[in-house]
Image (cartoon, grey):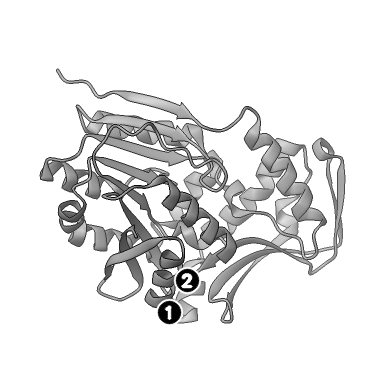
């Protein structure tokens, strides 16, 4: 019986996540207006809530991207001939199986490298893939793709790096540019970059995707307060905050904010901080940029990539691009 090799590579310095959370919480809560990076939402509970969001009727991005992958995975496999599939922000790695199957059918696939900051969720997803694909080398890389983009030692052959789900939309323009430049510096001729991007569309459709009637999205947004309570000893009362979803037409992105429902004071003893919220005060917790083909092509080009292919779903809601190092 052929067994799959599963390895775990940890690229983050000891204590990195705890210190980064402390720094982000302090900087964001003393800022005006207040802001908390959405990446801290994704503890175990937050990841579970996000998976529920992807199954909601109004949340189209996951279905739209999957439909593109289902239609184009074979073409992607043929074009790239990838020996290694690397997925950044892998999460549960569900859509990735369409690429794994296509590359395996093509006869080139040798290894899979999921990369994520949440070790528990990452390792569980990697184990499931390892069980489903006997003989496949799987290396789970615990890394923060903004600061410690760690890729395992190269064993030769073409590599396909996937960054799906329009996760790149959670980065501000400067952050996107820095990330793509960092990734480009690690790739060589023959490698490829597969990028999922949610597209600009009717604002009503966009807002509905982030503001479901069942309240799953609201619970997800408020989970960042639970993370601060658990990690920093904070005393946020989740029911003291409402949620606001806004389409910013100038920046072409969705903003998600938590709004204080009353005057209140929150203490965070682990970082020796006391924070006042006025009634009606809003705190930014998520930005989700939407893209146009020409815009993402320009951003890729500025970072040293050349877009080779562009696909959308039948409804034109989501875009998937395949680029090569220029």
Q: Residue at x 26, y 29 (%)?
A: 131
In the displayed structure image, the side of residue 265 where residue 63 appears, left or right: left
Where residue 85 appears, as percent x and y from the top left, is: 29, 43
> For mark 1, what is the residue?
201
Counting other residues with Cα less than 10 Å from the Cα at mark 1, is it few (<14), some (14-19), or many (20 or more)? some
Q: Is label 2 in a helix, a strand or a loop?
A: loop
**Gap between marks 2 and 1, in whole Å?**
8 Å
On the picture, is 234 further left or further right than 107? right
Residue 204 in sight in this render? yes
Toward which corner of the image does residue 20 lie, by quadrant?
top right
Seen at 60% across and 68% down, the residue is 255
Count of all numbered marks drawn on residues in the image: 2
Q: Residue at x 37, y 36 (%)?
A: 125
Farthest residue, direction top: 1
Question: In terms of depth relative to the viewer, which is nearer, 317 or 5?
Answer: 5
263 vs 297: above or below:
above
Q: Position of residue 112 (x, y in %)?
A: 30, 37
Residue 115 appears in which quarter of the rendering? Answer: top left
User: Which residue is labeled 2 in the image?
Assistant: 290
Q: Are marks 2 and 1 in contact (CB under 8 Å)?
A: yes
């Amino acid at each position: 019986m052929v067994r799959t090799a599963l390895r775990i590579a940890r690229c983050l310095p000891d204590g990195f996540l705890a210190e980064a959370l402390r720094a982000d919480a302090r900087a964001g809560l003393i800022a005006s207006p207040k802001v908390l990076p959405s990446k801290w939402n994704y503890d175990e509970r937050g990841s579970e809530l996000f998976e529920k969001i992807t199954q909601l009727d109004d949340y189209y991005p996951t279905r739209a991207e999957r439909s593109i992958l289902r239609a184009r995975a074979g073409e992607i496999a043929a074009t790239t001939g990838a020996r290694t599939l690397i997925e950044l922000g892998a999460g549960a790695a569900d859509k990735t199986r369409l690429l794994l199957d296509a590359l395996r059918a093509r006869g080139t696939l040798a290894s899979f490298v999921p990369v994520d900051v949440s070790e528990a969720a990452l390792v569980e997803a990697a184990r499931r893939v390892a069980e489903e694909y006997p003989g496949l080398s799987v290396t789970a890389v615990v890394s923060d793709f903004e600061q410690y983009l760690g890729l395992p030692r190269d064993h030769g052959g073409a590599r396909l790096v996937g960054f799906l789900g329009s996760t790149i939309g959670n980065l501000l323009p400067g952050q996107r540019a820095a990330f793509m430049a960092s990734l480009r510096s690690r790739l060589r001729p023959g490698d490829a970059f597969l990028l999922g991007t949610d597209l600009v569309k009717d604002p009503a459709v966009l807002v509905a995707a982030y503001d479901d009637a069942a309240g799953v999205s609201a619970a997800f947004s408020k989970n960042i307060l639970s993370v601060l309570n658990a990690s920093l000893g904070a005393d946020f009362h989740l029911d003291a905050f409402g949620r606001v979803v806004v389409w910013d037409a100038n920046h072409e992105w969705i903003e998600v904010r938590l709004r204080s429902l009353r005057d209140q004071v929150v203490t965070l003893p682990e970082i020796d901080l006391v924070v006042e919220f006025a009634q009606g005060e809003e705190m930014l917790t998520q930005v989700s940029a939407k893209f146009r083909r020409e815009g993402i092509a320009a951003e890729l080009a500025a970072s040293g990539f050349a877009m080779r292919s562009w696909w959308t779903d039948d409804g034109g809601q989501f875009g998937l691009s395949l680029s090569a190092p220029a």
